[in-house]
Image (spheres, rainbow, N blue to C red):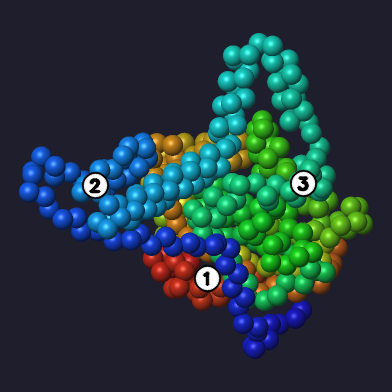
Amino acid sequence: MNKHAQNSQAAIVAGCHHSAVCQQPGQQHQPETNNSSNNVDTNSSAFFGWALGLPVFAGVQTPENGYIEACRTQLVRIGAFVDEATTTVMVTLWTTSPVLCLFFYLYLLVNFKSLRTLLLVYLVFCLFDPRPYDGVGRRVPSINKLPIWDHVNRYFKPRMIFEEHLDASRKYVFGSHPHGVISYTSQLIAGTTGLGIESHFPGLVVRGVTMPATFCIPFFRDYALAMGCLSCDRDSIRAALSERRHKIRQSLLIVIGGAQESMLAHENSADLVLLKRRGFVSEAVRAGCDLVPVYNFNENSIYKLVDNPPGSLVHKFEMAIRSFFGFTILLFHGRNIFFTPYKTQLTTVVGRPIRVKRNYDASAEEIDEYHRLYVEELIRLYNKYQPKYAPNSKELRFVA
């Protein structure tokens, strides 16, 4: 088992966002007029006069007293407002797409009788489609060209930091922490968004895995498959990591904490469910994949979770849903009634790979040793970067 050298490579900082600062010119001082009835907002007059094609009379607005500059100022302000509003709407649609897709399907089913047969056949297809579980899925690489990623980029300004270069000839199992409310950062850094790991290391193929229930949501399931997502069940993971079966070298990104950790996604918290999670280590050893811890700073600040201390009515509700379905329905809120996420910069730090020797029949002691190394690397990663990228976050804590 290889130990990491003390002199590791310098961290590779890969900024994903393209910032553009629009400096607004100062408002020009307008001379006062003696007639109080003509005391108007000259900037507004200039803009609306120009926009409506109205003539500007001499002595009221001229290039010398700021007419052109006022127009430019107003146009910059309106342009910035339109850009911000468009980005906010697009990001809101993206983050709420699972619910929107479900309600859109039900709307079509109820209101369009001519489509009911087709919609019901499609639903049966969703329930029995084998592609989420075969290790290949239905990936569409060109999805990274969609304009939505430009809006997501501007809204969250995601950035990635790699402590070491990743060799595209090797396979990895990336463990993503924390889960957050809906694991948005994990969606960005895995798959075909053009903002994640693959964009920094050509030739490396990273597939995200998610709960099987995701592939039962009409329309949204097809988006998830196009993104490269696969089911997180054991057979699907083994199929994805099997080169002999598919003749392609794939790495996986797994959100280790699952539904249990999502219930702990309070703002500025760093509570993880990891100590008893060894399945991902076992599969990595079986497939000979290096283990790589990943921490997503500010993931828990995207939404604000309703207080759910153990024993509370909210906690009992979430536990009841989780015990029945395997996932839970969280009570949370965003910036507004449309569940627009809070605007926070997302920073992903990818730790040093832990070299794993392939073993189809690894002992419990060997699994425990790899797990210990993984936990130690994750702790080191958090303690090193938390003061810089999430100074308000609490101390890292393992609750299970």
Relative image position of residue 49 (x, y in whole percent): 31, 40
Query: In the rendered structure, which disc, 1 or 2, sits on the residue that comes first in sequence?
Result: 2
Relative image position of residue 394 (x, y in whole percent): 41, 65
Q: Which residue corresponds to the image point at 91% horizontal and 56% vertical from the top-left? A: 247
Q: Is residue 52 above or below residue 385?
A: above
Give the residue type at disc 2.
Ala
Q: Quadrant of the N terminus?
A: bottom right
Relative image position of residue 196 (x, y in whole percent): 65, 60
Q: Which residue corresponds to the image point at 46% horizontal and 52% vertical from the top-left? A: 302
Query: Residue 197 versus residue 52: which sits nearer the camera?
Result: 52
| 1 vs 2, front mark | 2
Query: Residue 32 versus residue 156: which sits nearer the camera?
Result: 32
Query: In the rendered structure, which disc, 2 or 3, sits on the residue that comes first in sequence?
Result: 2
Residue designated by label 1: 382
Q: Secondary structure at mark 2?
A: loop
Residue 360 quadrant: bottom right
State if disc 1 and disc 3 touch (CB < 8 Å): no
Residue designated by label 2: 58
Residue designated by label 3: 139
Disc 3 packing (10 Å; few <14; some 14–19; many ≥20): some
| 2 vs 3, front mark | 2
Horizontal placement of 236 versus 371: left or right?
A: right
- Per the model, the C-alpha gap separating discs 3 and 1 is 32 Å
- Furthest-bottom residue in view? 7
